[in-house]
Amino acid sequence: MAGQGFAPAAIESMLDLDAENFLYVRRVMKGDIPQSLMDEVGAGLDVSQFHALSALLRIRGGYGRAAPQEPTIGLLAEELWLDPSRASRIAADLVDRGLATRGVSQQDGRRSILFPTEAGLTLMQAYLKAKWQRTARVFADWSEEEITSFARLFARYSEGMRQQYPAHGPAAAES
């Protein structure tokens, strides 16, 4: 990086950022963060079930997509980067637990879609409340300026990473 014009202090900071980012991403990928919150709210779900329930809500809401869509097993599999048979088993677990239900597509009556139940929505609301309580504690001793700067700089970093490392796979077109 020195050959690209970065000063030693900037290089050291980038290496520190890379190390911290690695630790954070590892905790997310292992499921430590959502599992900790699910344990707090007494969800009784494993990480894959939680990710599937939250994926249903993202698909229905259009979060990270061009527009809201009806959550099918195929879209659930795409969202979770799983094969359809694994996504179908996880969806069945959510149905068995009363957190989701199956219905008929309004767009194509031959397709089955998934709906979160009231219990599923209540669980996600409890999860989000616990998440934001913890997030508030993380930022409790940060100034407004620090929070605003961090959010702006992190968005800038994230956009740069998206440009340098474009998404691949089925969901790439939706990003």
Image (cartoon, grey):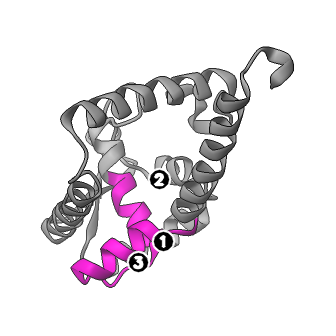
**Sequence-first disc among 1 and 3:** 1
State the SS at label 3.
helix
Residue 135 vs 58, above or below: the answer is below
Q: Residue at x 42, y 67 (%)?
A: 33
Q: Look at the image and say whether residue 52 sits in the magenta stretch.
A: yes
Expressed as whole percent of the image width and height from the top left, the position of residue 156 reads 47, 23
Indicate the amino acid at tag 2.
Answer: Leu
Indicate the amino acid at tag 3.
Answer: Asp
Indicate the amino acid at tag 1.
Answer: Asp
Residue 93 - label: 3
Q: Bounds of the magenta span?
A: 30-56
Q: Whole-Å distance between the Cαs marked 3 and 2? A: 14 Å
State the SS at label 1.
helix
Expressed as whole percent of the image width and height from the top left, the position of residue 48 reads 49, 70
Circle 2 is placed at which residue position?
76
Q: Look at the image and say whether residue 138 sits in the magenta stretch.
A: no
Residue 32 - label: 1
Question: Residue 167's quadrant in the figure?
Answer: top right
